[in-house]
Image (cartoon, helix red, strand yellow):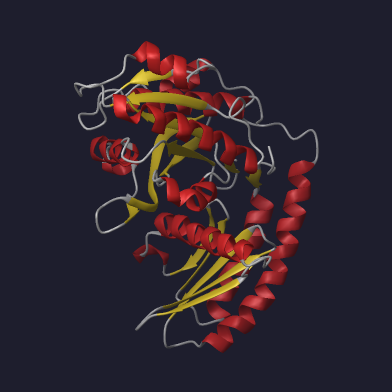
Amino acid sequence: MVNPQMVMYEEEFNQIQTVVDRLVREANAKVVFIVDKNGQLIAASGEVDNIDTTSLASLTAGNIAATGGIAKLLRENEFATQFHEGEKANIHIQLVGNRVILVVIFDSKSSLGLVRLRVRKASDELNRIFEALLSKVQEPGGDSPFAEITDEDIDNLFND
Amino acid sequence: MSFINYMAREINCKIVYYGPGLCGKTTNLQYIYERTNPDAKGKMISLATETERTLFFDFLPLSLGEIRGFKTRFHLYTVPGQVFYDASRKLILKGVDGVIFVADSQMERLEANQESVENLRTNLAEQGYSLEKVPYVIQYNKRDLPNVVSVEELRALINPMTVPDFEANARSGVGVFDTLKAVSRLVLNELRRGG
């Protein structure tokens, strides 16, 4: 496979959550979330109860994939930043380390300048965390919890 | 590429429905959406044109239940089937864990099926996958229509590897869940092998 398995452990998850929680406060954002490039939600913070984060994650990843496709056609490496301005809500999308996507949703209580500034700092931190996570995942010897699953386990999933 | 989250105790896998235009990929997803318990599904998203042709993808998140204390979640995607949307199809295959090829059983779509399988093979290869290795099942859809090719003939043409295959009528739901279960099983087996 081209991509190594994406795995999230408690230690790194807590580090990521800390960065995301802080970004919500420091950028005066409504919601901040992190998605991998395949559309899986990794972490979220802020007013997430009113929002369908699963759908948002998938659409954001689709958006980044489409923009990446356009970049390739123009012989650009990536368009790492996107910004969409709405009447009430704005969304800032940043590709971090070409692996995960950092999304900030904000309203008139914040500004693009502030969000950009805080995103830059958070991106550096996130990049370091994901690099460390990646090298941990690639270390040999990590037992998969699924090595032991049986045909019966799989059958049970489909019993209803 | 599945995503194992030890913190949330979840595994997430990506299944892609592939096939020629109007073969019934979106109809498969719609049927699954209608027949799934509300707790087990998220919102279905369709990025479609005004004439309801898939423009980019359809998306449906599903929860299957727990395995060894891990919640298993499947993200189902369809690709746009029309030939000229090839750039979009490539993007949707990124990070795929399992593929369902939906074939249109009608005589006049025979060639379109063959082209689409070849296109799948090429696009997977571009992402570094091979059709021989990725969990893969085939669905012969629209079996209820009068002008269908026999399953034997379809099998000979588009299933030379003899992967698991199913007859279906996605509109009424025949074969829809059987196909999904078969690919899910292969994906989980792959996970067991540490793929």
Q: Provide residue B34's location: percent of width, then percent of height.
A: 23, 39
Task: Work out whether residue B2 can be spotted.
Answer: no
Q: Residue at x 22, y 32 (%)?
A: B171
Q: Residue at x 30, y 29 (%)?
A: B108
Occupied quadrant, residue B83: top left
Is residue B32 shown above or below A30? above
Task: Work out whether residue A105 can be spotted.
Answer: yes
Q: Is residue B35 left or right of residue B55?
A: left
Q: Provide residue B42's location: percent of width, then percent of height.
A: 34, 48
Is residue A103 shown above or below A40? below
Total residue callouts: 0
Q: Residue at x 67, y 70 (%)?
A: A123
Q: Nearer the viewer, residue B153 or A152?
A: B153
Q: Provide residue A125's location: percent of width, then percent of height.
A: 71, 68
Q: Nearer the viewer, residue B152 or A98?
A: B152
Q: Quadrant of the N terminus of chain B?
A: top right
